Image: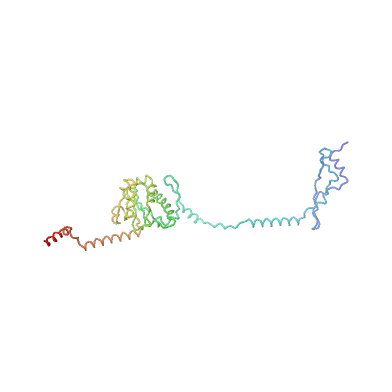
Amino acid sequence: MDLPPESKMNSEGEGRPAPPTSLPLQGGPTQRKKLSAPRISLSLDQSEDDLGETPDDLDINVDDLDTPDEGDYLDYTDHEKDWEDLSAVSIREPYDPIPTYSAEEERQDGKLWRTVIIGEQEHRINMKIIEPYMKVISHGGYYGSGVNAIIVFAACFLPDSDREDYHEIMENLFLYVISTLELMVAEDYMILYLNGATPHRRMPGLGWLKKCYQMIDRRLRKNLKSFIILHPSWFIRTILAITKPFISAKFSSKIKYVNSLDELQELIPMDNIQIPECIIRLDRELMESAENSRVNSFLQGPEPPAAAGRAEPDVAGASSS
């Protein structure tokens, strides 16, 4: 009668010592740990009878297998950590700490740039670079009935043309002027151009003025009722004469020249217009100079009539005769 496989295996293994079922955990510090291993069959025969059997000459003595003790394991782990630490130190690059950023600084930094829409296009203005020149345009109150605004443009606040960043400043300042003009104007308006006390190096170029005129919205062109130039110089008169062929005759008819603040006061209300001190000083000097010229003319008296000069040949002819 054939025995089941389990019985057969038990009968064949009666003469062998039973494998340990646990590890001896007590003993001296140098005692090795013993691990049990499963029975290994290296037979190439796949028959049912030999399944699970192992030839005697290929038996492995589990007792002869050594495993690392606890001290060796811990020592190996420590060396591995040391190697990782050394490699991490060699690869890690130095870095600067991230500076702290307060809420107030973040709020101020948000004001450095302004996004505007001009001509259905989005533009960004560097407000930091034009901060010293933002007084170039201001609101001068209203005139007449309604909300007819007076826009004051002071050329004396423009940057010097010899600056290295002059073109960058003027580009951002141009966007600021155009966008501010659109915000200030609701209905009809006039522009007061303060030309006096402005050196030649601060005068805006012809291309910049032409670009401003071209970028102004059609509504702003139509609602502009007057363009007053205070203390006009030969330079600004020349520029306007050159640009006259490029602008409409209707716009040219809106240009008015005013030579003094007294004359300006007769045209528009001056209560809310902030006139720079340099222009007030220039206006005073021009008035004093004009007054001195009138006094000198009065003291010199009238010039001799031209008829007396034509009578001299007759007198000379009479004496010769």
Q: Outermost residue toward the left?
A: 321
Left or right: residue 49 compared with residue 185: right
Q: Position of residue 156 (x, y in %)?
A: 37, 57
Quarter of the image with the N terminus is top right
In the picture, measured across the screen, residue 17 lies left or right of residue 174, that is right
Across the whole image, how many numbered discs are drawn on residues?
0
Residue lying at the far front in this picture: please name it: 321
Which percent across, then down, holds residue 256? Answer: 30, 51
Q: Quadrant of the C terminus?
A: bottom left
In the orientation shown, which residue stands out farthest toward the bottom?
A: 299
Between residues 13 and 306, which one lies in front from this camera angle?
306
Give 170 or 206, whichever is nearer the viewer: 206
Percent position of residue 216, x then y: 38, 47
Snapshot colouring: rainbow
Q: Is residue 4 above or below residue 27?
A: above
Query: Would residue 249 be found to the left or right of residue 133 on screen?
Result: left
User: Can you tell which quarter of the image residue 75 is in?
Assistant: bottom right
Depth check: 285 or 109 in front? 285
